[in-house]
Amino acid sequence: MVDPDTLLADALAQVDAAPNLAALEDVRIATVGRNAPLPLALRDVGTLPPEERGEAGKRLNITRQQIEARLTQRQAQLESSALADTLANDRIDVTLPGRAMPHGGLHVLTQTRREIEQIFLDMGYAIAEGPEVETEFNNFTALNIPDDHPAKADSDTLWVSDGVLLRTHTSPVQVRVMGAQDPPVAVICPGRVYRRDTQDATHSPIFHQVEGLVIDEGITLAHLKGTLEHVTKRLFGEDRKIRLRSGFFPFTEPSIEVDVSWGDGWMEILGAGMVDPNVLEHVGYDSTKVTGFAFGMGIERIAMLRHGIPDIRMLYDNDVRFLAQLSNS
């Protein structure tokens, strides 16, 4: 029969000497584990003479309780020490400035579109949107574009099926607006459009437009000119002037092309004109009572002029180095 006092002294010495929690677990197994001397001695109590069993079992159980109590105490000490070490090593100085986190910004095309939209919102216009897959009627017929017009050729337009195409401008949205409400109308129609163009420095098969429409009684070319002068100054600066040149669009009559003063010369920025009476009649308006004007500008072209971007492809290459220079973040 082992001596409980010897077991206790040896076990307590091992517990106190354990340098960390892993070592303490090894001591626990060695002193009170299933195959340690103390549990084995408790199992052997039944082999002692009856008169010795009570005293021997009592002493061994007290020894076990004392060892387990010291194990618990040492575990708490080591856990506290480990926590202190962790806090000391991983300490964060909350007074230091935080790390700057990289973040994105609006694409230059989105910035330009929103600036254009805000100019017209300030003037009382509404914003209208429509589907990019359009009917031939809305995209061509209602806009006074005849069946034999070159714009309808497969070489110019992306047809989805008979009578259905990817819209070539946002003017079909104007047709939808006029078909849904009576005058007065004052809307702009921003959106993506599609044409069968070969991509180069100034052309892309997918690009963005903002087209505008005003319909009411007594609308004249003077209203259009005043509107375009205001928009041009907001976009390019108060010192800018505009020049109107005669042009041709099937859905406006008269039609004009608009240039903005640029350095020592002029730069074309948009097309416009008075809404052709045939277009008004197509949507059910009385062309003897109401008149209107329409205009359209390419968002890419405006962005390229304002920021000196030489190639339209730079807007679509997703080169973060380039886009970051024009980010509003």
Image: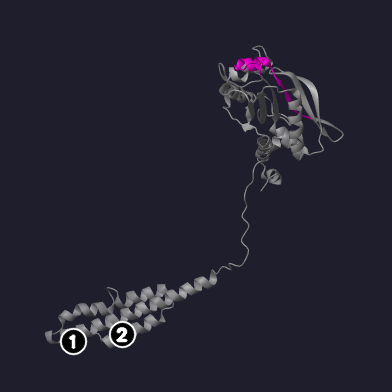
In x, y percent, where is residue 192? 62, 30
In the image as oriented, which residue stretches furthest toward the left? 50
| Quarter assignment of residue 108 | top right
Q: Which residue is at the front of the view, 4 or 278? A: 278
Residue 49 image position (x, y, % from top left): 13, 85
Query: Label 1 to label 2, Cα distance in Å?
Result: 16 Å
Sequence-earlier tag: 1 or 2? 2
Residue 328, placed above or below residue 123: below
- Amino acid of disc 1: Glu
289 and 293: which one is in front? 289
| Residue density around tag 1, few if under 14, some if 14–19, many if 20 or more, within 10 Å | few
> Residue most toward the right?
264
Mark sitting on residue 8: 2
Secondary structure beneath dot 2 equals helix
Vertical arrangement, residue 44 with respect to residue 313, above or below: below
Does residue 221 appear in the picture of this structure? yes
Is 186 displayed left or right of 24 in the figure? right
Quarter of the rendering containing residue 67? bottom left
Indicate which disc residue 55 carries.
1
Does 230 lie within the magenta span? no
The magenta segment: 268-289
